[in-house]
Amino acid sequence: MKKIGSLLVIGCMLAAFFMAFSVYATSTASYYVSPAGSDSNPGTESKPFKSLMKAQSAASSGENVYIRGGVYDEFEIAKTDSTYNYVNDFIKSGISYVAYPGERPVFDFQNVPTNLRVAAFYVEDGVTGITFNGFDVIGIKVGEREQSEAFRIKGQADITNVAAHNNEAIGFYYTGRGTGTVLNSDAYNNIGPTDVSAKNTDGFGAHGGAVSFINSRAWNNSDDGFDSISSTGAVIYDHCWSFNNQGNQNGVGDQNGFKVGGYAYRTTGIPDPLPIHTVKYSLAVNNGANGFYANHMPGQSANWTNNTAYNNAKSNFDMLERVSPTDINNIPGYREILHNNIAYKGTTIRNDNNSTENVTNNSWTIDGGLQITSEDFVSLDTSQLSAPRKSDGNLPDVTFMKPVSSSPLFKYDLGYLADK
């Protein structure tokens, strides 16, 4: 009887769940857009809208806009100010813009004028709960402007499985009070053609509030792969890869893998307390400057744990700090914390004045420095790093710089693959 009673209770619970789900599913509206649609349509699956802006005007918080596959290359600029052409201007909270299952839309902005900077997707300050999922952004031009952006986030937005590539623009740019998470996303081949724009064209930028970059990759961008200069919130870099960021055609651009923290030489407008960033299980390879860079932070820039750096031109790790928020003089870093990291090929670390207890269990500190050779790794084939993502959007499985089981790197659980 107890068993039958338990089964009845479980059955009732399941029935209640499915009834609740059914009510939710039927009460949550969805809208559709397609390159072949029309903004005079009702936005249904069979009669979709043509533009995201029309879908936004119809949708409410908690609802989805499904984006059909194909190329979107006809746009009306939603908003302008003295600086920007905002092609898509998101002013309503809580709406998800999601690729239709099994399809991969492409937004091509090559025909948008560059009389002003271009922001292809702009999330306004105060807007929250926006999500973008499952599409490509290409073709953004910069002209003679200082920069353009694929995503300019001043509100709160989460981005998953999106690729911003082959632009003259920054891929993902959080600014002002912008916050959110960027998961399983790529920024590559984003190159500013002029020397001015080349210095601004990062793959990922976190220059506002707290932002998390997870399982994301940046390569072949003209400035930095990842950059969080002037951030007021703590930024997390978790299982991210940054490689081959080497400037524009003239070699112009900062070219760091991860530029973490810092406020240039400002002495005002610096947050108190300073945010302490997190860089873990990440990879920096073949960048034109530093792999992992503390960027003259006027305090501790980050906790650096289980990262791998290979063959970065200036240094694999550069822990340069500033004396304080009010003293702009640069000093070797003494507040950074580095554990379980690997550096191979090139200069291991510079500007390092950290205490011994803050810099332990790294490839260059264990037993006076491990004598690493290529035989310590399964592979040094960097071409693996730009392999296609898995069907679920996760990073590809690679053997690049994976320690062989006989290596002391494996014994000490060092590097970006230690948790794999």
Image: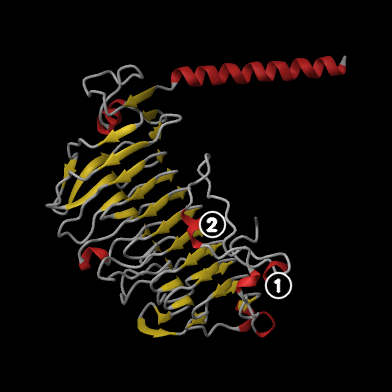
Crowd around label 1: few <14 · some 14–19 · many ≥20 (10 Å): some
In three-dimensional space, the C-alpha distance between marks 1 and 2, rounded to whole angstroms, equals 22 Å
Q: What residue do we see at 34% from left, 25% from top?
A: 32
Residues 324 and 318: in front is 318
Name the N-terminal-most of marks 1 and 2: 2
Residues 218 and 212: in front is 218
Q: Looking at the rendering, which quadrant does residue 105 occupy?
A: top left
Q: Secondary structure at mark 2?
A: loop
The amino acid pointed to by label 2 is: His
* In contact (CB < 8 Å): disc 1 and disc 2: no
Instruction: From the image, tell me which residue sits under label 2.
Output: 239
Crowd around label 2: few <14 · some 14–19 · many ≥20 (10 Å): many
Q: What residue do we see at 23% from left, 44% from top?
A: 109
Reply above or below: 413 against 178. below
The quarter of the image holding the N terminus is top right
Q: Position of residue 298 (x, y in %)?
A: 42, 77
The amino acid pointed to by label 1 is: Pro
Reply above or below: 128 against 244. above
Q: Is residue 151 visible?
A: yes
Instruction: From the image, tell me which residue sits under label 1.
Output: 408
Q: Which mark is residue 50?
A: none
